[in-house]
Image (cartoon, grey):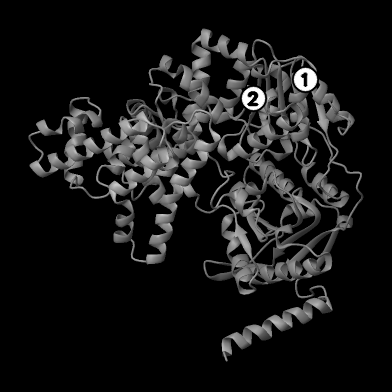
Amino acid sequence: MDLSLLNPQQLEAARHGEGPLLILAGAGSGKTRVITCRIAHLSAERGVAPHNILAVTFTNKAAREMRERVEEMLGRKGCKAMVIATFHSLCVRILREDIEALGYKKNFSIYSTADQVRLVKDLMQQVDIDGRKFDAERVLYAISDAKNRLVPPEKFAVKYHDDYEYMAAEIYPRYQKSLKAFNAVDFDDLIMLVARLLREYPAVLEKYRERFRYILVDEYQDTNAAQYLLLKLLAGGHHNLCVVGDDDQSIYGWRGADLGNILEFERDFPAARVVKLEQNYRSTGNILAAANSVIKNNTKRREKALWTSDGAGPKVDYLLCEDEEDEARAVMERIHGERFRQELSYSDFAILYRTNVQSRSFEEQLRYENIPYVLIGGQQFFDRKEVKDCIAYLKVLVNPRDEVNLLRILNYPKRGIGETTADRLIRHSAKHSLPLWQVLKEAAGLEDLGEKAQESIAGFVTLMERYRQRFNRHGLMVETLRELVAELRLEQEIYRTVDDPKKARRRVENMEEVANAMASYLERDESPSLPGFLEKVSLLDDDRPGRDSKERKLQRDAVVLMSIHSSKGLEFPQVFLVGMEEEFLPHKKTLTETFNLDEERRLCYVGITRARRNLVLTGARRRKKYGEMQPRVPSRFLDEIPTELLNSCRSEQPPELPAEEKEQRASKAFANIMDILGD
């Protein structure tokens, strides 16, 4: 196997044999190449059986790319048995085998965020918490945070005496009990339950330790307490754990990521070898120098400094503007100018910001100037109502105990089972400790239900049982789905309830896209099934291919607008890091705690290191706040960049446009005027 393209540090990491290994991989240092070369080396040179190799990452896109690269080196057959997966898909795989030990059935549902919020709202109503006054999502966030820290309901303690913590303490036990009653788990359960399974059942732990003899983990700095325990348990017997990460790019503390996992790796694995990857293959020397000068001010970090052999490149520009509109105009001027100077595509430009609200002025200016753009971070396909309705039917077909989705579809489309009837069914279910589905099947014997309601319920149960058998008996899944949608008259229901015909048409197309997604799944999966399709849907992330995906958007020739968080892992020739002001970057919520300020500095570092050739930092003297102009203070992170690396200028003195561009823009303006005037 040819490893000649690796530098000495990359080669050392790829050829490491037995025992723990920590690879500190700076931004743009070729970590994916190192991981894939290490996997190939273990298999081809050290004779490790493919089924004994486990590689774990955070996104489907990263897992997909990793597998593709390994296949290029070993061939598809050589790595077919390897498990290269996200944390969540790995845990689903384990739970499908062994979850019965924890009292669940193997056909468990995986609740989406929308399912979780709906359940929390129902539980809040049961304990008389006003859902209009208190946000169910914030209650759910507190529960999720507890699960990420491996805190079960009975040990949940109020720390900050916050209203939402008190509510979480009340709701969490009921929430978990309801999930189990519905034979359902949420995303946090996937990891927490596997950690519990491995900790409490030695035979199960030993089985997976024997299966996964060599473990590799990407983006280790983003792991939380539950993921850390999972890895520690799996690697506890052989210690063949290779983790790759960069503490300087740890930006998900608010989501439970524990920086200590990477900073204190040797605490749990004292014999660990540490390899630093500091040579950068992405950015110019000046961009790297600016990044290094900012991040070195963090105290809790591993010492390292990025460098490149490709030269210094242009200085980093700092553009001070009058206000947000002026900032947007100045960025457009730069985009026009650089496109003509360097013959660049629109997709070579990215505008990065700390908070999504900052995109507004840039969107308006891009539209005004007819510049194509894509906004990363909008509503995702499987989060849309019409899609969730369709998926809810499929979830109940697989798991009738899934009461959140059962209640969603019980009277959609309307079939004469109104709220009063549903309440009576729910009360009967609770009073007699019966699953709601069983109550529906026995509804004919309930005295407090009218004859019409009983007929409607019987029709619903018959329909669901018929389609459950059809999905189970033959492989025509797509055709069966389309027949179900047609029989339910979902398309007609959308046109009936949506006033705007164009919006209705788009929603119908979205619903049809579910069938297309199922068809794609059938083509890719070796042993497809309806539960398998739903599992894939539940585990999809923002990097999924398909309509409106992040991946698809980034393929267009358009300026990219996205938050710094969303930009992690990406790179662009030209980057505008906008809003370099106090209260934006660093964010106003983080200015009181050193820990949070460190994460803001890491966020700034991530933004800077997205740029390959040109980096422009922008800020405004004043901005509108609550309808009034208020003065702004430049970000403290600007002071951490040496002046010799910065080229500072003001927006009112834009660079002279090339003559060719002036002529083209004048022609375009004239053509627009003629269009307005008409013939």
In the picture, residue 658 is in which quadrant?
A: bottom right
Is residue 160 visible in this depiction of the protein?
no
Is 132 located above or below residue 370 in the figure? above
Amino acid on which the number 2 mark rests in the picture: Lys
For image coordinates 82% across by 27% down, the residue present is 275
In the picture, residue 507 is in which quadrant?
A: bottom left
The CA distance from mark 1 to mark 2 is: 14 Å
Residue ID for mark 2: 80
Q: Residue 234 vs residue 650: left or right?
A: left
Is 354 located above or below residue 361 in the figure? above
Amino acid on which the number 1 mark rests in the picture: Ala
Give the camera-side residue of 360 and 94: 94
For image coordinates 85% across by 53% down, the residue present is 642
For image coordinates 22% across by 25% down, the residue present is 433
Give the camera-side residue of 525 and 147: 525
From the top left corner, tell me how far across and down residue 26 is, in percent. 78, 38
Is 441 located above or below residue 44 in the figure? below
Quarter that holds the C terminus: bottom right
Quarter that holds the N terminus: top right
For image coordinates 27% across by 34% down, the residue present is 466
In the picture, residue 249 is in which quadrant?
A: top right
Residue ID for mark 1: 44
Give the camera-side residue of 265 and 179: 179
Q: Residue 122 vs residue 196: left or right?
A: left
Instruction: Check the image and name the residue furthest to the top.
Output: 203
At mark 2, the secondary structure is: loop
From the top left corner, tell me how far across and down residue 220 is, in percent. 67, 30
Q: Residue 254 vs residue 613: left or right?
A: left
At mark 1, the secondary structure is: helix
From the top left corner, tell me how far across and down residue 141 is, in percent. 47, 39
